[in-house]
Image (cartoon, rainbow, N blue to C red):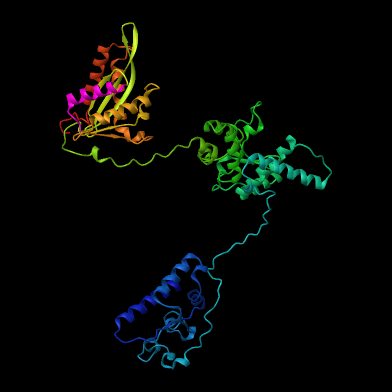
Amino acid sequence: MWLQAGLIGSRLLNNICTALDLPIEKRYIWTDSRTSLSWVCSDSRRYHPYVGFRVGEILNSSTVDEWHYVPSKQNVADDATKWGVGPSFSASSRWYTGPDYLFLPENELPEQPAKQWKTDEELRTRFQHHREMPQPLINVSRFSNWNRLLRTTAYLLRAVKLFRTRGKSGPLTSEELLQAENLLWRQVQYEAFPDEYCVLEFNKANPEKKQKRIEKSSSLYEQSPFMDDVGVIRMNSRIGAAPIVPFGVKYPIILPREHTLTALLVESYHRRFKHQNGETVFNEIRQQFRIPKLRPLIQRVARNCQSCRLRKATTRPPIMAPLPKVRLTPHIRAFSHTGVDYFGPILVKQGRSLVKRWVALFTCLIIRAVHLEIVHSLSTQSCVMAIRRFVARRGSPSDLYSDNGTCFRGASNLLPEQMEAIHEHCAVTFTNARTSWHFNPPSAPHMGGCWERMVRSVKAAMGAISEHNRHPSNEVLETVVLEAEAIVNTRPLTYVPLDDED
């Protein structure tokens, strides 16, 4: 009640100061409540939300220095509700003139006690819980391999046993490894689920008492956990009565997902199955363990596996270079800039024997049209005749581009030597004031991608045409080559819509 009155009083004081034109040097707010004054003068966060919010609103319209204490006998506001007589309405009463101390000098005002009062009213309750956390026997985060962690733990347990009693040395036994596993399960579960572990441990140690329940907010609540004979938390299931199913399969061990030991365990299964088939790893782990969101964890382990990263690594393709000027020159005759390439050989039936034929492909570097000529050999003279037939039908090009001799594929073993002679003779024959021959640098097949792609398209068209004729005659081969040329040259350069609106 006082907090609401104090909030109204501080706002009323601001409204009066705003309405008056008189200069105000100092403001005073009087209250006879020591508890309320201690709330205003202390940190509001120490109290319950209701008190804290109201004190914060009061201090938004006033300051701590403006609040002063007045004894109840001198508080005029109490005349209306206290003392049983009511206020006096005479003109000279303090109900109208105010308390007497207002007319006194500032040094004679009511004595102000220390403002740093402390009160326990509406104070927030603080709980402090002290519990000794046992130190783990082994630091799991220091290991990067599950088998090494398991065997190190087993040897550590053996060393502890040797210190206490005289034991035997030698290779680790299955019993020692099983004890090490149980120790690691208990350590991880205690670190990840401390409250649940204490509840289940109490229920196991006190079966005759009322059993405690796990909080509904716990991640283990829906898994019906229980603690087995060795202190490991397991998930209850509905197949407990199955006689031939092992105990670990009927009651899988519960492990946290975001723990280092869980990641090491999943990685060991991942390596056991040779970095393959994540579903197999998932099925094998589920036979013994209950790990939430196991599939994403298996995928994360596989992504972080260095062997898988090396095996699945792919080269990053380089950024394609800008197109040369001859590929972008507009408004010129077709085949002005031409690329030439060979492909083959193609076996042709001639009489009772088979002979080799090659196809010379000429492509316009701008509009990507193709011209095909059958070449009977890899000699210089055959190359010259093919180019002469091309020039007679398409016109003389201004620039001819071709690969170096080592870039021709499917040719015979004599191709590099013969093509070197062809290049030299063709360059001498066709280099004039109108035509220039350009060779790509050695070991740069990517510079001939323009005609290499056309070779692929022509081969696909020829393969579809001569699908049932493996060894055609010369006449059939010429017909097939010309039909393939027509198919490639009639391809649409863009999408051809069928709708009227498009």
Judged left or right of residue 272, residue 491 is left
| Residue 162 falls within the magenta-colored stretch | no
Query: Residue 127 falls in which quadrant of the image?
Result: bottom right
Judged left or right of residue 41, residue 447 is left
Compared to 177, does 475 lie above or below? above
Q: Between residues 62 and 415, which one lies in front from this camera angle? A: 415
Q: Position of residue 71 (x, y in %)?
A: 49, 84
Q: Between residues 454 and 353, which one lies in front from this camera angle? A: 353
Q: Position of residue 69 (x, y in %)?
A: 48, 83
Q: The N terminus appears in which quarter of the rendering?
A: bottom left
Q: Position of residue 327 (x, y in %)?
A: 24, 37
Q: Between residues 288 and 31, which one lies in front from this camera angle? A: 288
Q: Between residues 251 and 35, which one lies in front from this camera angle? A: 251
Judged left or right of residue 78, residue 357 is left
Please report the residue visible at 31 percent of the width from the left and 87 percent of the height from the top: 22
In the rendered image, the residue lying farthest to the top is 352
Look at the magenta stretch and give its main secondary structure: helix
Compared to 73, does 438 lie above or below? above
> For the image shown, how many numbered marks are present on the structure?
0
Q: Position of residue 320 (x, y in %)?
A: 34, 40
Q: The C terminus appears in which quarter of the rendering?
A: top left
Visible residue check, residue 424: yes
Judged left or right of residue 49, residue 291 is right
Visible residue check, residue 83: no
Q: Which residues are magenta?
A: 379-397
Please report the residue visible at 19 percent of the width from the left and 26 percent of the height from the top: 391
